Image (cartoon, rainbow, N blue to C red):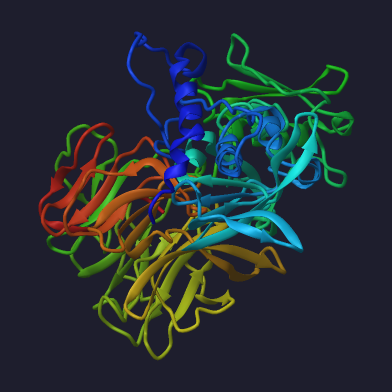
């Protein structure tokens, strides 16, 4: 849609004047300042530069309705205290009702005011349609919720109100919350993982939310304090059924009154003052509370967070946890850094390479029946402890589990499917951090998602609630914490990516397991062909956007995009693998280049020319 030329007036000058004050505006300095030349209009959402600051400007006397609407939309993109300048464009009644913190509507680009409509006798004033393309909403819990891109059309209404300077145009009715274009959203907000414990386990689960890049306009909290506050408020609604917080339940625990800035000391430690509800917390519980904060804060600073110290309201110490102690609660602590990358070699045997090596080295076959040629392998999944593996063979019709560190006989298949072939047989298996094995049977006459407790017990069918409505599972990937599952679903010739919760009910030794509340994880992609977990709340996917070419890119599990998430081009990618250890390189299978690896800061490098199905443990 075309931009309204009226937006190139006051708002453009407002944005430009903010940019010109470089020393006060940019977090990273300028080498020099121009002393001549014109000021050019810069439209909101033109660029997503987190170093740019936008300073809101209040309405001038006798501002026109156009200027009021444009100025208000611009003021919403600023960090102004409590959005006071934005409120100056509203009537007192509208300002009192407007709660910018309750939600944020994200559009593909800045909202465009359409042609105004004059009021009627029963509703005088002016109405402006706000137009755009709706792509996501961030709710009051800071949770990002992508939507299928659709037309956005809401109305903003103005009336003339008497004031000290005579009658002035002001906004008396407007949409709820904030309304931002994608670039302004990316400039103002950042994703951060809160961490809670998986239900019944001492393993943390990531819960991604969005907080302000800088000081929050409403609470005046810095990003670290915002993250701790969001953690104390509890998990988001979607994740809540499968996690627990070790912070005291009941009335919500809070930071000590007045805490708006939590900073690291000269030893990279963080002191967190809590309110009176923390006074009688025992040491064991306190240490787990500190672990939740440690994991939540560790990625918010370029410096390594070495310890977290929790304080009572009176300033006395509750407990101290070091970074090393916290690692015991990591979802991958049982396996740690993977020793190897695995793939199916040209003779359809399971082979391995040293993980993270600067040189590829010579592949070696694993011990046992999966590496000696007794089976022609179709797909593989290696347990997170790297002691055993599950393989699919027999034209994708049989699943076997055996040791890969010692020789043994070829076991009987643990699952046999009536379906065969890469589209109708079994999917590649996936191991969660509990040691359970997951696989989907794509038999057209009896499709099912199955779980083998401990990787060796009898397979159980896992219900998906609500059902798939005719869609078929094409791939299964379970998170290291075992609380979430990524599924590629095919319906009507299109394959989409969805994330579901893994819920366990009943006897902890023999629970009833279901997958619930599937939600889209890559709505911007028209077709997804491969997926792998790439950290606590990040996925790497292979797919195409509508009308686009194949991409390999990172996305968040909440469906939001990762800055600079599109990776170097690679042709004809059929599978991709990432480690829970984010320092490890991506591995992929390309029909053109074979097994390739993507080291940090480099381009794809061929590891093995002939081979398929690369995997990391998991």
From the viewer's perspective, is residue 132 above or below residue 83?
A: below
Foreground pick, 47 / 496:
47
In the image: residue 557, left or right of residue 83: left
Residue 329, image quadrant: top right
In the rendering, at what x and y percent does residue 158 appear? Answer: 68, 49
Foreground pick, 193 / 334:
193
Q: Quadrant of the N terminus?
A: bottom left
In the rendering, at what x and y percent does residue 154 appear? Answer: 59, 59
Q: Quadrant of the C terminus?
A: bottom left
In the rendering, at what x and y percent does residue 244 appear? Answer: 71, 50
Q: Does the image show residue 390?
A: no
Residue 404, image quadrant: bottom left
Q: Does the image show residue 363?
A: yes
Determine the residue positioned at 49% across, 22% down: 18
Tag count: 0
In the image: residue 138, left or right of residue 554: right
- Looking at this view, name the residue that lies furthest to the bottom: 445
Determine the residue positioned at 68% across, 38% down: 89
Foreground pick, 147 / 377:
147
Determine the residue positioned at 64% across, 18% down: 263
Foreground pick, 154 / 64:
64
In the rendering, at what x and y percent does residue 21 appear? Answer: 48, 15
In the image: residue 81, left or right of residue 544: right
């Amino acid at each position: 849609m075309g931009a309204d030329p009226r937006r190139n007036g006051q708002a453009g000058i407002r944005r430009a004047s903010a940019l010109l004050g470089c020393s006060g505006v940019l977090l990273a300095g300028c080498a020099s300042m121009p002393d001549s030349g014109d000021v050019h209009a810069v439209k909101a959402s033109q660029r997503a530069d987190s170093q740019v600051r936008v300073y809101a400007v209040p309405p001038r006397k006798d501002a026109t309705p156009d200027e009021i609407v444009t100025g208000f939309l611009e003021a919403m993109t600023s960090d102004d205290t409590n959005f006071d300048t934005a409120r100056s464009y509203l009537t007192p009644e509208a300002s009192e009702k407007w709660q910018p913190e309750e939600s944020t509507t994200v559009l593909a680009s800045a909202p465009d005011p359409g042609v105004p409509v004059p009021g009627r006798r029963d509703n005088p004033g002016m109405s402006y349609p706000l137009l755009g393309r709706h792509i996501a909403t961030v709710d009051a819990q800071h949770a990002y919720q992508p939507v299928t891109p659709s037309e956005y059309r809401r109305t903003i209404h103005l009336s003339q109100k008497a004031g000290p300077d005579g009658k002035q145009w002001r906004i008396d009715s407007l949409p709820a919350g904030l309304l931002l274009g994608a670039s302004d959203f990316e400039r103002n907000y950042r994703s951060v993982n809160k961490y809670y414990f998986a239900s019944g386990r001492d393993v943390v689960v990531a819960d991604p939310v969005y907080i302000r890049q800088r000081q929050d306009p409403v609470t005046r909290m810095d990003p670290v304090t915002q993250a701790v506050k969001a953690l104390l408020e509890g998990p988001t609604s979607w994740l809540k059924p499968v996690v627990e917080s070790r912070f005291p339940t009941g009335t919500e625990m809070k930071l000590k009154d007045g805490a708006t800035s939590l900073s690291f000391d000269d030893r990279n430690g963080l002191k967190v003052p809590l309110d009176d509800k923390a006074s009688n917390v025992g040491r064991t519980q306190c240490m787990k509370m500190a672990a939740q904060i440690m994991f939540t804060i560790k990625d918010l600073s370029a410096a390594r967070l070495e310890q977290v110290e929790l304080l009572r309201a009176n300033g006395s110490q509750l407990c101290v946890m070091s970074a090393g102690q916290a690692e015991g609660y990591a979802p991958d602590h049982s396996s740690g850094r993977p020793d190897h990358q695995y793939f199916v070699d040209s003779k359809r045997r399971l082979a391995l390479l040293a993980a993270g090596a600067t040189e590829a080295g010579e592949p070696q076959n694993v011990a046992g029946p999966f590496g000696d040629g007794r089976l022609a392998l179709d797909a593989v999944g290696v347990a997170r402890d790297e002691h055993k593996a599950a393989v699919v063979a027999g034209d994708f019709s049989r699943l076997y589990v055996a040791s890969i560190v010692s020789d043994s006989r070829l076991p009987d298949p643990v699952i046999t499917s009536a379906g065969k072939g890469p589209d109708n047989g079994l999917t590649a298996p996936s191991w969660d951090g509990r040691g359970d094995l997951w696989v989907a049977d794509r038999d057209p006459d009896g499709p099912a998602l199955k779980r083998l407790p401990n990787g060796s017990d009898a397979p159980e069918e896992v219900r998906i609630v609500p059902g798939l409505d005719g869609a078929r599972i094409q791939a299964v990937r379970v998170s290291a914490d075992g609380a979430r599952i990524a599924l590629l679903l095919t319906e009507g010739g299109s394959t989409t990516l969805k994330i579901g919760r893994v819920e366990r009910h009943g006897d902890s030794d023999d629970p009833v397991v279901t997958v619930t509340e599937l939600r889209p994880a890559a709505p911007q992609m028209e077709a997804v062909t491969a997926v792998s977990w790439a950290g606590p709340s990040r996925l790497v996917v292979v797919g195409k956007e509508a009308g686009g070419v194949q991409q390999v890119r990172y996305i968040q599990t909440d469906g939001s995009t990762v800055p600079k998430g599109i990776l170097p081009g690679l042709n004809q990618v059929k599978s991709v693998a990432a480690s829970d250890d984010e320092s490890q390189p991506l591995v992929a299978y390309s029909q053109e280049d074979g097994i390739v690896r993507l080291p940090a800061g480099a381009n794809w490098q061929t590891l093995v020319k002939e081979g398929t199905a690369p995997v990391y443990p998991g």
